Image: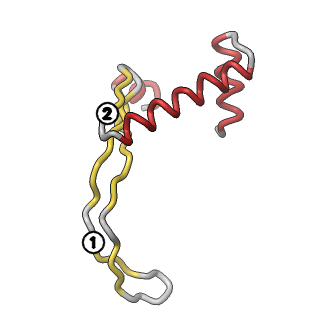
Amino acid sequence: MNKAELIEAIASKADLTKADAKKALDAFIDATSDTLKKGDRVALVGFGSFSVAKRAARTGRNPKTGEEMQIPAKKVVKFKPGAELAKVVG
């Protein structure tokens, strides 16, 4: 599902116009991004939680040449599904 399909699904399930659904989705993405940028966690009970984790620097290999290369440390976004979501998918 891409963003346009998600907007359409939100619009139909919430009885909104596509424009309003797009505004709502964009607001959710902005709020979540801002919260994660600060290093805080976003928890949606039953759905899951988004958090930021630090990934340490490590040595990797260039798959083309086999040459070793240093991969720098960075922050990554993690998603942990909630119990209800896991049950639905599982």
Between 39 and 70, the residue placed more toward the observer is: 39
The local secondary structure at tag 1 comes to strand
- Which image quadrant is residue 5 in? top right
Q: Earlier in the sequence, mark 1 or mark 2?
A: 2
Tell me if 34 is positioned left or right of 60 in this view: right
Identified at 70% across, 13% down, the residue is 16
Tell me if 70 is positioned left or right of 9 in this view: left
Q: Percent position (x, y) of residue 26?
A: 59, 30
In this view, 37 is above or below 45? below
In this view, 30 is above or below 76? above
Tell me if 30 is positioned left or right of 74 in this view: right
Identified at 64% across, 38% down, the residue is 1
Q: Residues within 10 Å of mark 1 (few under 14, many from 20)?
A: few
**Residue ranking furthest to the top:** 15
Mark 2, residue position: 41
Give amino acid for label 2: Arg
Between 13 and 25, the residue placed more toward the observer is: 25
Give amino acid for label 1: Arg
- Which image quadrant is residue 2 in? top right
Identified at 33% across, 60% down, the residue is 74
Mark 1, residue position: 58
Q: Percent position (x, y) of residue 23?
A: 64, 24
Q: Percent position (x, y) of residue 12?
A: 70, 16
Identified at 38% across, 42% down, the residue is 37
Question: In what quadrant of the picture does the C terminus appear?
Answer: top left
